[in-house]
């Protein structure tokens, strides 16, 4: 086993020649590591295929470097710097907030200026399911414990009052449940209100900032946080004095009390375009603004959400909650290890910085895209980096009971899967669940992404995403096509203007996550005469947003339907980073069929199949697509991905969903198994007969359409397609058809319009 | 009577799940025959020959088991050496007990299948040996 090994990441997925790229490296082993730059060609080590291929770039980025072990702070929390100790409770303290805890039985910090190692300061915390107010002087810790335990996912109003002179302290909690804001409604006779009073010694000042949703680990380790909180907080306020009984009652009743030294409003800053920043505003006027660390879930339903409005933009006053998770991560924040300039003559492509220490190796991928003034190839391959992020470090089979049922096979795990399971600090994907059951809705590039390694065989039992896309990179290389590599991040930023540099753009195996800007780019490009090859499936399916301030981070909120790992809770489907509705593009009137002709219809992850030619295959206007392929040939009944070119996930034409009426249906796959399933959004009523054995919608379609001005789109509708390209030494009908189309699309001259 | 402590209440779904599991396993038990085991051993994925309905029914149940404590095939040396491991909670290293090693993924996956049947009481030692 080589699971304790050197790992690294870089600061962004895409880089241009002449730009610098920062790398962050950590190893549990002392000593040095060596680096070199490699161009990645083929990753899949399936013995039936061409095997692993990379090419060293001689003399570039070769070196020996000192290894160090770097610390990762996981867990979402808020930091409020307080250099003047104005929030230290030395004058006494009044504290109010609303709280909705998801795992109240764990020890967690809610809010405090507390140093956990030194046991100094004050904090409101959770211990054994109860709210606790802590005062510590470095020698002793005094506790005021609420007598009533908290019910999970129920809103409580919480008030703490402390008189520094007399030591009189009180802690009270009041249930603020309504019909919609908590796990259960008003039917439950919940006796959760409680109050306790006592006398506590004055806390000593802790040399740490005020934290929400965690406790500072130690005065000696700035930035390290323990006892991270799971759940929502809403509207914390701090008073530099004890609160009177009438004030406590008013706060519990939803009223305001003047004189707060800090009044944090998590909804302040919401605009039509979301609440993207990490800032937490202190609306008291005293400037105790906070900063979110590790991207907690923002724009969440608050304690006073009444269920009548589902979009935070329309009633921000009911979206004052932030949902914290102990395992959130937006950036490992390691010390930079290397800052390397990309050589100006390095061709566009997929590369990796190889890190080698002792018997362990890591390859940190990145993508070199053409510079603004570079000579362009006629072909662009758009690597779906948004989708790479969505799947980054997915652990579905390790964490979701139904994962193997979805797959339909007993899969095999390897060292990377086990390393991910044992290393929670590398974070999870938008397919995983936080400790408290909420789905991960953010994913970051700035961490080691172990399933983005070129030779990783995905936990689903086949190569997936980037390693699968290398099937196509290899084929393009072997066939001698001159092509540039672009990424989703480039298309999102530059739109159709970027695509117009090329005669043809290719989308590889699984570009599942897209932004509005990306859909616009393709639509404008194709209608302006651009040509596209969609050699994958389940593409352009989920709405994804790029964080405007942290472009290495995406947000995804899974919607009310779709083939999905989790579902946004009521009132929480709109993206905090942009304000747009999450879920399927199909449910925002932008089904993939409208642009690419086909869209997601079924998954079949156990066995793949071949395509059977249909009448449109004989249309003389597209005879060039079938050149060299016999009319009776089954297309792709072979391949590295489960034995066929149609499999994993598949798309179909659907004129009702926007497939252009002039689209030709050239071939469809047949022979899928009982574990191949129609997607949920097409099921409406649940019924038997949705599998590949008995449902005609479980298939992949090869479709072709033209647009005005010489544009055209060719879609093969299967994630397994590219896995068949190398079969029989690259001589086969999948390879031939792909080559026929690419050669024609990349050539000068018009494409005959098919209407 | 008001509710005061979440610890006083448990998820009664567990009662039903136990009942369902007992009934479902009783229904599946007769399906687990030497023929069915041989069918799985021959082609665990069903890629060469589609799985029959009986094997599909058994696999559907097996695939849906909870993750914690679930057995899995571990590629110790992909393509050359495989073992059977036991998954545990996130952040906890899986168990990789000493046991037979397998030269192919197909054999290891079949061993996982047998292990899961055994843990469910769907396989006795005699059947496993046949």
Image (spheres, rainbow, N blue to C red):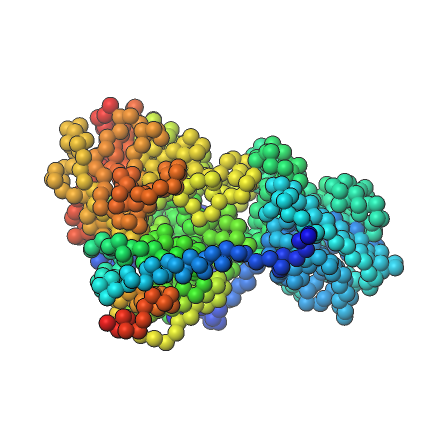
Total count of labels:
0
Residue A101, position in %: x, y? 63, 53
Q: Is residue A213 left or right of residue B102?
A: right
Residue depicted at x 66% and y 53%: B3
Q: Is residue A509 left or right of residue A116?
A: left
Q: Is residue A673 visible?
A: yes
- Please identify the residue farthest to the bottom as the structure is shown: B98
- Please identify the residue farthest to the right as the structure is shown: A166
- Work out which quarter of the rendered image holds the N terminus of chain A and state it: bottom left
Closer to us: A357 or A461:
A461
Residue A189, position in %: x, y? 67, 48
In this rendering, is residue A384 above or below B114? above
In this rendering, is residue A747 above or below A489? above
Q: Is residue A227 visible?
A: no
- Work out which quarter of the rendered image holds the C terminus of chain A and state it: top left
Residue depicted at x 51% and y 47%: A442
Residue A187, position in %: x, y? 63, 44
């Amino acid at each position: 086993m080589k699971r304790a090994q050197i790992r690294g990441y870089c600061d962004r997925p895409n880089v241009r020649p002449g730009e610098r790229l920062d790398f962050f490296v950590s190893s549990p082993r002392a000593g040095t590591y060596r680096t070199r730059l490699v161009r990645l060609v083929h990753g899949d080590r399936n013995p039936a295929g061409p095997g692993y291929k990379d090419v060293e770039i001689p003399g570039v980025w070769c070196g020996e470097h000192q290894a160090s072990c770097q610390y990762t702070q996981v867990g979402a929390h808020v930091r409020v710097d307080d250099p003047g100790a104005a929030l230290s409770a030395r004058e006494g303290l009044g504290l109010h907030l609303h709280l909705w805890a998801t795992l109240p039985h764990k020890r967690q910090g809610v809010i405090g200026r507390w140093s956990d190692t030194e046991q100094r300061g004050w904090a409101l915390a959770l211990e054994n399911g109860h709210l606790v107010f802590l005062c510590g002087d470095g020698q002793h810790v005094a506790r005021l414990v609420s007598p009533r335990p908290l019910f999970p996912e129920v809103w409580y109003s919480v008030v703490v009052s402390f008189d520094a002179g007399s030591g009189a302290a009180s802690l009270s909690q009041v249930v603020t449940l309504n019909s919609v804001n908590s796990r259960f409604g008003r039917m439950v006779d919940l006796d959760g209100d409680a109050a306790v009073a006592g006398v506590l010694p004055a806390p000593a000042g802790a040399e740490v900032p005020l934290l929400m949703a965690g406790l500072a680990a130690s005065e000696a380790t700035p930035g390290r946080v323990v006892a991270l909180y799971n759940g929502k907080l809403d509207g914390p306020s701090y008073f530099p004095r004890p609160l009177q009984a009438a004030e406590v009652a008013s706060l519990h009743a939803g009223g305001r009390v003047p004189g707060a030294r800090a009044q944090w409003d998590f909804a302040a800053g919401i605009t039509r375009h979301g609440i993207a920043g990490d800032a937490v505003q202190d609306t008291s006027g005293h400037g105790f603004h906070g900063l979110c660390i590790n991207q907690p879930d923002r724009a969440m339903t608050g304690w006073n959400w009444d269920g009548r409005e589902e979009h935070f933009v329309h009633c921000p006053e009911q979206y004052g909650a932030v949902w914290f998770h102990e395992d959130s991560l937006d950036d490992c924040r390691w010390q930079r290890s290397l800052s390397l300039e990309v050589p100006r003559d390095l061709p566009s492509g997929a590369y990796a910085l190889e890190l080698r220490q002792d018997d362990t190796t890591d390859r940190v991928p990145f993508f070199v895209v053409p510079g603004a003034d570079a000579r362009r190839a006629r072909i662009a391959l758009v690597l779906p980096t948004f989708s790479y992020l969505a799947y980054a470090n997915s652990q579905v089979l390790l964490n979701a009971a139904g994962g193997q049922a979805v797959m339909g096979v007993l899969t095999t795990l390897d060292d990377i899967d086990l390393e991910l399971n044992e290393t929670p600090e590398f974070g999870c994907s938008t397919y995983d669940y936080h400790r408290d059951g909420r789905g991960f809705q953010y994913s970051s590039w700035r961490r080691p992404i172990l399933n983005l390694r070129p030779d990783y065989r995905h936990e689903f039992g086949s190569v997936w995403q980037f390693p699968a896309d290398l099937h196509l990179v290899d084929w393009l290389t072997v066939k001698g096509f001159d092509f540039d590599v672009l990424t989703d991040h480039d298309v999102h930023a530059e739109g159709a203007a970027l695509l117009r540099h090329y005669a043809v753009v290719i989308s590889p195996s699984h570009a599942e996550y897209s932004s509005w800007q990306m859909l616009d780019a393709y639509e404008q490009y194709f209608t302006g005469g651009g040509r596209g090859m969609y050699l994958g499936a389940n593409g352009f399916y989920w709405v994804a947003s790029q964080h405007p301030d942290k472009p290495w981070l995406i947000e995804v909120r899974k919607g009310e339907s779709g083939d999905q790992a989790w579902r946004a809770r009521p009132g929480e489907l709109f993206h905090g980073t942009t304000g747009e509705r999450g879920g399927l593009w199909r449910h925002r009137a932008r089904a993939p069929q409208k642009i690419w002709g086909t869209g997601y219809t079924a998954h079949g992850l156990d066995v793949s199949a071949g395509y059977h030619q249909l009448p449109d295959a004989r249309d003389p206007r597209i005879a060039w697509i079938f050149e060299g392929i016999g009319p009776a040939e089954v297309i792709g009944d072979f391949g590295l991905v489960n034995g066929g070119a149609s499999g994993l996930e598949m798309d179909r034409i659907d004129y009702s969903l926007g497939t252009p009426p002039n689209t030709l249906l050239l071939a469809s796959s047949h022979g899928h198994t009982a574990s191949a399933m129609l997607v949920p959004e097409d099921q409406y009523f649940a019924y038997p007969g949705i599998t590949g054995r008995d449902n005609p919608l479980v298939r992949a379609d090869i479709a072709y359409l033209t647009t005005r001005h010489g544009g055209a789109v060719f879609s093969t509708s299967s994630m397994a397609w590219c896995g068949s390209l190398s079969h029989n030494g690259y001589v086969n009908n999948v390879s031939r058809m792909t080559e026929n189309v690419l050669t024609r699309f990349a050539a000068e001259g018009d494409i005959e319009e098919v209407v | 009577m008001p509710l005061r402590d979440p610890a006083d209440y448990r998820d009664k779904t567990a009662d039903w799940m136990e009942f369902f599991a007992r009934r479902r396993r009783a229904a599946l038990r007769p399906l687990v025959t030497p023929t069915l085991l041989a069918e799985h051993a021959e082609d665990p994925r069903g890629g060469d020959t589609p799985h029959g309905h009986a094997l599909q029914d058994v696999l559907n149940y097996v695939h849906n088991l909870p993750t914690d404590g679930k057995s899995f095939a571990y590629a110790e040396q992909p393509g050359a050496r495989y073992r059977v491991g036991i998954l545990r909670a996130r952040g906890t290293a899986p168990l990789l007990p000493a046991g037979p090693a397998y030269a192919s993924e197909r054999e290891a996956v079949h061993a996982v299948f047998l292990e899961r049947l055994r843990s469910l009481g769907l396989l006795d030692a005699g059947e496993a040996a046949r």
